[in-house]
Amino acid sequence: QSALTQPASVSGSPGQSITISCTGTSSDVGGYNYVSWYQQHPGKAPKLMIYDVSNRPSGVSNRFSGSKSGNTASLTISGLQAEDEADYYCSSYTSSSTPYVFGTGTKVTVL
Amino acid sequence: QVQLVESGGGLVKPGGSLRLSCAASGFTFSDYYMSWIRQAPGKGLEWVSYISSSGSTIYYADSVKGRFTISRDNAKNSLYLQMNSLRAEDTAVYYCAREVSEWEPTGAFDYWGQGTLVTVSS
């Protein structure tokens, strides 16, 4: 099972919106509504930001939103803030022998 | 509050073994699927293994199949990962994580431990 494909880096200015893509196949992202997104600051454990494509856990800012079209899922961060600077990973349920797969990760830089 | 605390990491020689533990508290451990997820230094996340709430269903990543064994003791609120035949490429921080859903595994992990570092080197 290959990792889902994410852009290596995305940047934006404070207040702007950015979108991170996560591309898979019909066996993972396209086949199930089980896409999650995680935020990870250096030296910290990942934090769940979005699950089941577009659901936000309690306590996560509504500036974070998720969506999916075909085999590509997306995470949008609106009103970009300095604290959003981190690595972001998507993950998906898969129909392969390995039930879960993570994305390659995206470094978000706030300019 | 929900807490997951890993232990058991350390330096081990190639071919050696190590057993990781994850102590859970603040929730009904026996209700949840649990996973181990690892992250090599400077690299991305890699899912390693999951175990169902009862322990009856287990899956492994192809990279560890046949070498790693996941288990749990619901009476002790603990999750384990027995790692045998360790290789240099197994060097990583290992996290235990809880699934969001009590009912089915979906790969959404809402609570993570702080991680324990496993280094495989001669």
Image (cartoon, coloured by chain):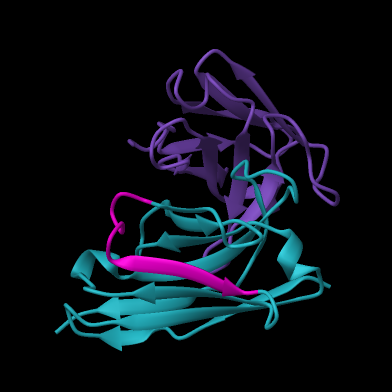
Chain colours: A purple, B cyan
The residue lying furthest to the left in this view is B122
**Count of marks placed on residues:** 0
Residue A51 x, y percent position in the rendering: 69, 39
Q: Quadrant of residue A61?
A: top right
> Which residue is outermost to the front?
B56
Specify the quadrant of the image occupied by residue B120.
bottom left
Q: Which range is magenta?
A: B61-73
Q: How far across and how far down the image is residue B12, in percent? A: 26, 85
Residue B74 vertical position relative to residue A80 in the rendered view, above or below: below
Q: Is residue B36 shown left or right of residue B117?
A: right
Q: Looking at the image, which is closer to me, B51 or A72?
A: B51
**Left or right of A33: which side holds B19?**
left
Q: Is B70 colored magenta in this rendering?
A: yes
The quadrant of the picture occupied by the N terminus of chain B is bottom right
Location of residue A38 with respect to A65 vertically, above or below: below
Measured as percent of width and height from the top left, residue A44 is found at 57, 67
Instruction: Give how far across and how far down residue B69 sits, in percent.
Output: 39, 68
- Quadrant of image for the C terminus of chain B: bottom left
In the displayed structure, A66 sits above or below B65; it is: above
| Residue at the extreme top | A70
Residue shown at the point (34%, 67%) measured from the top left = B68
User: In the rendered view, does B49 fall on the left or right side of A54?
Assistant: left
- In this view, the residue in front, B9 or B85, is B85
Q: Is residue B26 magenta?
A: no
Residue drawn 62% across the image and 39% down it = A36
